[in-house]
Image: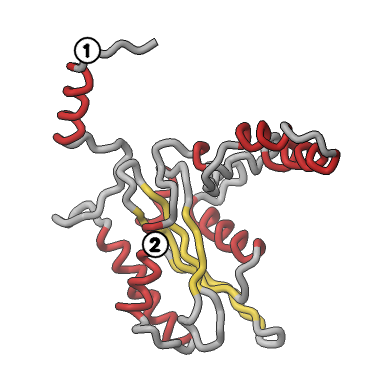
Amino acid sequence: MGFDDEVQTIQFVISTKRLLTNVSHVQNVHTDATYKCLWQGYPVLIVGTSDKDNKFHPICLAVCSNETAEDFMYTFKTMKLDLNPSPVFSWPPLYSLTFASPGLLLEEFQAHSQDVVQEYCGYFKKGWVDSELCHWFEGAAPGHPSANNGLESLKSLIKNNGTLRNQMPVGQFVNWALELVWNWSRERDSHTQDCKRFSVYPSITLQVQNQACKWLKQSQSFP
């Protein structure tokens, strides 16, 4: 936790060991900020992940002065140190999703002969295809949700059932957030009967099995 009274900056992250253990399973991370929870105007950052059954699991809640790259970096670094302080420990790729592949976009743009379009193609390929930021399109994360619906739903629950859409002072919000994160962790306690388990493998339902059987019985040939 950090607080600078002179410049009115604040940074703190709330999580538990049980929630952080999900990080060892993840291949994607969902993160976003929500506002109007604190009367000082600070954003509340929420970090979570989704399992192979596309169920959302929160990992931590943070409050920072702004919603900048530095604030998200502080949140992830704090989570990393709490989980594994080793300098060789690294996060899995973080996926940011959209609805087109980079190859298709380049094909469409390169069909134009204008110099400005070709210049943009060079920038796009260098910055978004051949760099570390190449996992921004939807097809980069097969088997994972293509939207942040789980995170958006959690944000709505926080405001509707938690803060009741009232803006709290920081001290009151911290006490409430501690209880909220504790409930997240308790719901994922493997010793409880209604545990929200993290699915490492996708569940194959009876409906999926029936559909697979029907598909196999179809007398269709594929090249």
Tell me the quarter of the picture where residue 71 sits. bottom right
Of circles 2 and 1, the one toward us is: 1
Q: Is 111 placed above or below 31 here?
A: above
Q: Is residue 71 left or right of residue 19?
A: right
Label 2 secondary element: loop
Question: What residue is at 42 percent from the left and 64 percent from the top?
Answer: 15
Q: Residue at x 22, y 22 (%)?
A: 215
Q: Measuring 71% from the left and 84% from the top, which residue is drawn there?
A: 7
Outermost right residue? 115
Which mark, residue 219?
1
Q: Nearer the viewer, residue 132 or 208?
A: 208
- The amino acid on which the numbered mark 2 sits, given as a three-letter code, is Thr
> What x and y, as percent, mark residue 216?
21, 18
Looking at the image, residue 47 lies above or below residue 158: above
Looking at the image, which residue is at 58% across and 41% down?
135
Quadrant hosting residue 172? bottom left
The picture places residue 55, in percent across and down from the top left corner, at 32, 51
SS class of the residue under badge 1? loop
Q: CA distance from mark 2 to mark 1?
A: 53 Å
Q: Which quarter of the figure is the C terminus placed in?
A: top left
Quadrant in the rendering for residue 75: bottom right
Quadrant occupied by the N terminus:
bottom right
- Residue 3 in percent (x, y) is at 62, 79
Q: Residues within 10 Å of mark 2 (few under 14, many from 20)?
A: some
Q: Amino acid at mark 1?
A: Ser
If you read the primary sequence from the N terminus, does the residue marked by circle 2 or circle 1 appear first?
A: 2
Does residue 36 appear left or right of residue 223 in this picture? right
Q: Which residue is mark 2?
A: 16
